[in-house]
Image: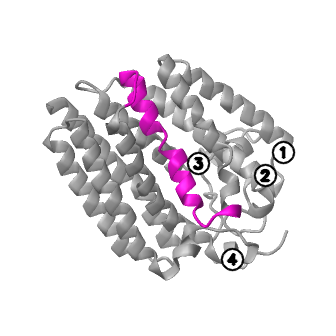
Amino acid sequence: MQESTGVSASDMPAASWIDRFAPARLRPYLRLARLDRPIGTWLLLLPCWWSVAMAAPGWPDPILLLLFAVGALVMRAAGCTINDIVDRDIDARVARTASRPLPSGAVSVRQALVFLVLLLALGLLVLVQFNPFAITVGALSLLLVVPYPLMKRITWWPQLWLGLTFNWGALVGWAAVQGELSAAPLVLYAAGIFWTLGYDTVYAHQDKADDVRIGVKSTALRLGAATRRWLVVFYGLAVVLAGVAGGLAALAWPYFVALAAAAGHFAWQVKRVDIDDPVSCLAVFKSNRDAGLIVFAGAVAGAVLA
């Protein structure tokens, strides 16, 4: 393994609940699934919850919310496993990722593939609880999930592909409630894509030194010092499109108040982030869970009062 020249440290939390409570044989798999780092699950789940709340005639169905929570947990784990299998050689050369289970040798490729099959089976079990149209829409997401790890090798915009992938739940959530798609979830999907472009560009700045050395691409490298201006564009478009989606869904005023609060949160992110400090980038990236929950709360209130 080559020594990293990057400044970022390992992204595996020290002394997490996995180390304290999980059996030793399970720990590498729980780390492979990122169960000690729930932010990715939140960012995958929230567009699903937004859409379920917008599509609901009143309060969202708690069973649907729970199914999407379980599905997001499982499919995020599956996505991370696919990503780590494909990127194991690259990860071994990056300071932040070198200690992950595959590059460190704690899990073999064969073991990871067996684990992936189990995760996909659990994801299918969740998916078949939905109506036939939602099942079809959900299954199509695999066309985006599988190629994602290759994007950093062929485009400066892998964060755009991640946006297409991570926000697919905005379509599935609406389909699960309504049994069809309309303009509102399509616009909400577009809003989520720009949201992801913002937060994952911030995230990518943690690895830019290693990425340059290895030769992989990212929006962090493409935008460079102009990142802060582009964050204004990405987050601004996300807010505008989310507002249009709320209007198309005929949500009441609390949704738009919440969206204004989320816009304030995004403005804070743009001002707060230091793109040359990995600690700052990670903290700002993680704060997007709070922004997403604000939008979700507003969507629930807006639907109930509509």
According to the image, label 3 marks what residue? 36
Q: Is residue 268 above or below residue 237?
A: below
Residue stretch rendered in magenta on the structure: 153-181
Apparent side of residue 222 relative to residue 118 in the rendered image (left or right): left
How many marks on residues?
A: 4
Give the class, few, some or many, for how many residues have Cα within 10 Å of label 4's Cα (few <14, many ≥20). few
Q: Are marks 2 and 4 in contact (CB under 8 Å)?
A: no
For badge 4, the amino acid type reads Val
Q: Which mark is residue 144?
A: none
Mark toward the viewer: 2 or 3: 2
Q: Residue, x 40% and y 58% (percent of image)?
A: 287
Q: How much space separates mark 2 and mark 4, taking CA atoms?
A: 22 Å
Q: Are marks 3 and 4 in contact (CB under 8 Å)?
A: no
Q: How much space separates mark 3 and mark 4, taking CA atoms?
A: 28 Å
According to the image, label 4 marks what residue? 212
Asked if residue 179 is among those painted magenta in the image, a careful observer would answer yes
For badge 1, the amino acid type reads Val
According to the image, label 1 marks what residue? 109
Q: Are marks 1 and 2 in contact (CB under 8 Å)?
A: yes
Give the class, few, some or many, for how many residues have Cα within 10 Å of label 1's Cα (few <14, many ≥20). some
Mark toward the viewer: 1 or 4: 4
Residue 124 position by quadrant: top right
